[in-house]
Image (spheres, grey):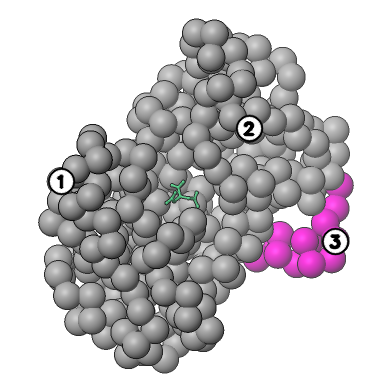
């Protein structure tokens, strides 16, 4: 059975196929959607807060004529609150739905769910570990904004330690050619060694640049992330880094023309609001792309058109 658990699963041919199918789904959505998933049901079970991931999956399902059942605050309102294991939860939901999107605060928990599931499981974010569908949206957005996915300078800014979105994107970019990564973060929030090893093994160039002004000047893509305050071990550790970085309009204006500022959202204070007016500000377009990419993924999983097993 095919699941979406990690960006590792996507080799370059599959990735290119997903990008082109997302383009087709953009046209489908603009025409008002269709009914190719009529009669199918998607379950969304989220043990952590979400706006975009849950609602865009649900919107994607409905744009293709499917239906949705949802547990929005599953940690509090599902039987997990009574002590049910995620394996038992899957054994129940697989008779109610044709695929499940899970979000969970504990890394690896969604893979445990997948191990016992007879229906596709999608990782909608597992703790600080992975957010594979976000990385696919990010790559699709890079292609739409820059016209290519290869030979790009990509600057990742912010909480690179606890942020699953920049981790997954960095690992997915090993499938592009000629990527040069720059990391800008407080020293406490640097990209984890396991990701750096992954990049080294794939031959992806990466450097650390403490100065955000220098880092954005040469970038084709500046990918900003918020401090993941819910993952900090203590209030003191959080206080040390709060407000440590911000992309201001003055700095953003020094970016190359044709470059893109991205953010998985939600934004707190790490991109100043007046950056939104700049042509490079791509983050709201990026969020919209989420629906098209997720339409493509749901169709591929539920219509069994592609083998996603790596
Ligand atoms: C991200 C997440 O949940 O990891 N949000 C999202 O899915 N777009 C980023 C974040 O919460 O900072």
Location of mark 3 (residue): 32
Secondary element type, mark 2: loop
- The answer to which quarter of the image holds residue 310 is top left
Q: CA distance from mark 1 to mark 2?
A: 33 Å
Residue 106 coordinates in the image, percent (x, y): 38, 28
Q: Label 2: which residue?
A: 72
Residue at 45 percent of width and 46 percent of height:
132
The mark that comes first in sequence, 1 or 2, is 2
Of residues 252 and 41, the one nearer the viewer is: 252
154, 22: nearer the viewer: 154
In primary-sequence order, the first of circles 2 and 3 is 3
CA separation, marks 3 and 1? 45 Å
Identify the mark nearer the N-term, 3 or 1.
Answer: 3
Label 3 Cα crowd, 10 Å radius (few <14 / some 14-19 / many 20+): few
- From the viewer's perspective, is the residue at label 2 or at label 3 nearer? 2
Q: Is the magenta region chiefly helix, strand or loop?
A: helix
Which residue does the image show at 27% across and 85% down from the upper left?
Answer: 217
Is residue 297 magenta-colored? no
Counting the numbered discs, the total is 3
- How far from the left and from the top, in percent, is residue 43? 68, 30
The image quadrant that residue 206 belongs to is bottom left
> Nearer the viewer's eye, disc 1 or disc 2?
2
**Alpha carbons under labels 2 and 3: distance apart:** 26 Å
- Whether tag 3 and tag 1 are in contact, CB under 8 A, the answer is no
Residue drawn where x is 72% and y is 24% of the image: 97
User: Which residue is at the front of the view, 239 or 260?
Assistant: 239
User: Which residues fall within the magenta stretch?
Assistant: 22-35
Q: Mark 1 highlights which residue?
A: 193
Q: Position of residue 164 (x, y in %)?
A: 36, 46
| Residue 289 in view of the camera | yes
């Amino acid at each position: 059975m095919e699941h979406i658990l990690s960006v590792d699963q996507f080799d370059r041919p599959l990735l290119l196929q997903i990008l082109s199918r997302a383009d087709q789904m953009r046209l489908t959505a603009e025409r008002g959607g269709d009914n190719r998933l009529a009669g199918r049901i998607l379950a969304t079970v989220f043990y952590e807060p979400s706006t975009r991931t849950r609602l865009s999956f649900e919107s994607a399902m409905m744009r293709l004529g499917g239906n949705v059942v949802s547990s929005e605050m599953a940690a509090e309102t599902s039987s997990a609150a009574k002590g049910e294991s995620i394996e038992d939860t899957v054994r129940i939901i697989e008779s109610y739905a044709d695929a499940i999107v899970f979000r969970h605060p504990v890394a690896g928990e969604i893979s445990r769910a997948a191990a016992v599931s007879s229906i596709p499981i999608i990782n909608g974010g597992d703790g600080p570990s992975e957010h594979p569908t976000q990385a696919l949206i990010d790559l699709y957005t890079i292609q739409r904004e820059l016209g290519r996915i290869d030979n790009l300078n990509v600057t990742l800014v912010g909480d690179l330690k606890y942020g699953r979105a920049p981790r997954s994107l960095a690992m997915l970019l090993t499938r592009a050619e000629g990527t040069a990564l720059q990391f800008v973060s407080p020293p406490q929030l640097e990209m984890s060694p396991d990701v750096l090893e992954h990049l080294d093994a794939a031959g992806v160039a990466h450097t650390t640049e403490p100065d955000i002004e220098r880092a954005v000047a040469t970038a084709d893509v500046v990918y900003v992330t918020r401090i993941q305050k819910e993952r900090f071990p203590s209030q003191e550790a959080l206080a040390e880094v709060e407000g440590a970085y911000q992309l201001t309009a003055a700095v953003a204006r020094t970016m190359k023309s044709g470059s893109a500022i991205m953010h998985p959202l939600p934004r707190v204070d790490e991109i100043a609001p007046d950056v939104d007016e700049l042509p490079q500000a791509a983050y709201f377009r990026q969020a919209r792309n989420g629906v098209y990419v997720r339409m493509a993924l749901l169709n591929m999983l539920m219509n069994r058109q592609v083998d996603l097993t790596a």
